Amino acid sequence: MQHDKVLILDFGSQYTQLIARRVRELNIYSEIHPFNKIPTHLEDYKAVILSGSPNSVRGEDALHPDLKGIRGVKPVLAVCYGAQYLAHFSGGEVAPSNTREYGRANLSFIKGNEPFFAHIHTGSQVWMSHSDTIKKLPEHGVLIASTHDVENAAYRINGEETYAIQFHPEVYHSTDGKQLLENFLVSIAGIHQDWTPDSFVEETVEAIKEKVGTDKVVLGLSGGVDSTVAAVLLNKAIGRNLYCIFVNNGLLRKNEFESVLNQYEGMGLNVKGVDASGRFLDALAGIEDPEKKRKAIGNAFIEVFDDEAHKLEDVKWLAQGTIYPDVIESVSATGGPSATIKSHHNVGGLPDFMKLKIVEPLRAIFKDEVRRVGATLGIDPELLGRHPFPGPGLGIRILGDITAEKVRMLQEVDAIFINGLKESGLYDRVWQAGAMLLPVNSVGVMGDERTYEKCVALRAVESTDGMTADWVNLPYEFLQKVSNDIINKVKGVNRVVYDISSKPPATIEWE
């Protein structure tokens, strides 16, 4: 089935992915492309959205998209930088605003009978984020909304289906942002809302069958949401020709290897569990630098995975749980406007010598969509609701060198913390939680004895995508109980602290 598609041109805004996700929430398929790499087949897209940008249209570094074949041809929504670009280079005027227009504002004027503002009323809250402002509208521009401080908050261009706004409808602070996007995409652009988890499953299963045929596929499972959903989709398409390998790197949570393996087998997956914990701990011996630890873990994983893959005969494909943000980041890194966030290699970055073709069933969807697809596939909600867990596992939550004893200690601490969150009904309030074993000994008193033992830091954050995160204000009573349990039950720990740093400036993990 051919879906109507929306093209989002990325000018480097931190909110670009959010625009795509808001469009997807309307059951409309959207794709992000760098402003300077516009797809050649524009006939595939029914509407175009121009994103915001940290750049200024007045600067020498202004970003210039090639809009022929787009403007006046397709419905266009220009957000923030896009709105200022259309004004500045089409007979209008953009100037520095007297004060930086950032944060909440309210619409004080909406032009009547505008389908773009249907079901949205004066007083509606919007989110501003710009230091320039449009002083004069472009040629044929018609003012359609203002706030108290920003006269030209929204305009349209006569003779085109082009709309422009100086606020961000994609952020939650814009209370009618979703309605505005729906007005533009459905009422104005006439797009069908048929991009659903059910349709994704059906079409992806068919595409896998067509692509892979009767070939064998190998997949490295991590126990996380992405690789699990990928495995179930592949299993639905090719059944026993899917060979899953779940490696115990010795850095998983307490009893996780056995419990996840049982869970996978209960789902009917063809899974082999490989306990390589000793191999990983040997590879990590004496290494303290976080990047060197990541490399050692990645290299050991490649070796183990390669050994196991070679035991299978005639495997042609490697399946990966790559999701859409990974794809976007890779594209941006090759010349798009966004700074490279990370170099993405799934399954630890498998080397060329494996010579396997790649199949990535989730490469078109975001993390929240992966969970919705998983629910459609009937995967256990508890597994789908699992907090993200770093690929290197506890290896980057033990600061300094790693030993079997430190792993044991942190597994016990982590189990008390995570189980405590579940028992207190707090687990689903948290996006990610974990404990860090610090390279710090401190003096304590237990009974009548002086102790000199380890300190652990607990971390719990709320987020939607991990790009930004706030620490969770867990109840004092809960922290008191967890702290007591850890100190009383985990030999070697005599101090517990709670991390109250947000991201940015801190990261979620400590390494």
Image (cartoon, grey):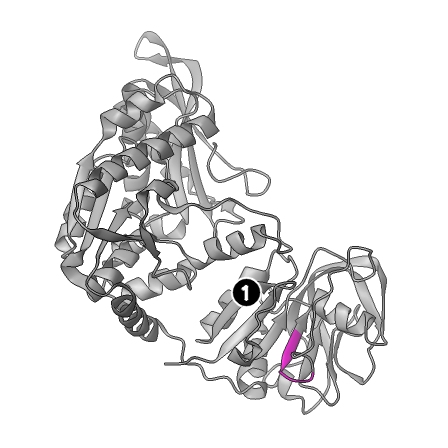
| Residue 38, above or below 417 | below
Identity of the residue drawn at 51% across and 72% down: 23
| Residue 129 in which image quadrant | bottom right
The quadrant of the picture occupied by the N terminus is: bottom left
Residue in front for this viewpoint, 56 or 2 = 2
Residue 140 rendering spot, x and y as whole percentages: 81, 85
Identity of the residue drawn at 58% across and 52% down: 334
Point out the residue furthest to the top here.
449
Mark 1 residue type: Ile
What SS does tag 1 mark?
strand
Identity of the residue drawn at 31% across and 50% down: 356
Q: Which residues fall within the magenta stretch? A: 72-77
Residue in front for this viewpoint, 17 or 211 = 211
Does residue 280 appear in this view?
yes
Residue 486 shown left or right of residue 86 in the figure: left
Residue in front for this viewpoint, 343 or 509 = 343
What secondary structure is the magenta-colored segment mainly? loop
| Crowd rating for badge 1 (residues with CA inside 10 Å; few <14, some 14–19, many 20+) | many
Residue in front for this viewpoint, 42 or 153 = 42
Residue 241 rendering spot, x and y as whole percentages: 17, 57
Does residue 416 appear in this view?
no
Q: Which residue is mark 1?
A: 32
| Residue 156, above or below 18 | below
Residue 52 magenta-drawn? no
Residue 480 rendering spot, x and y as whole percentages: 38, 33
Identity of the residue drawn at 23% across and 58% down: 380
Residue 7 shown left or right of residue 224 in the figure: right
Residue 222 shown left or right of residue 172 in the figure: left
| Residue 419, above or below 58 | above
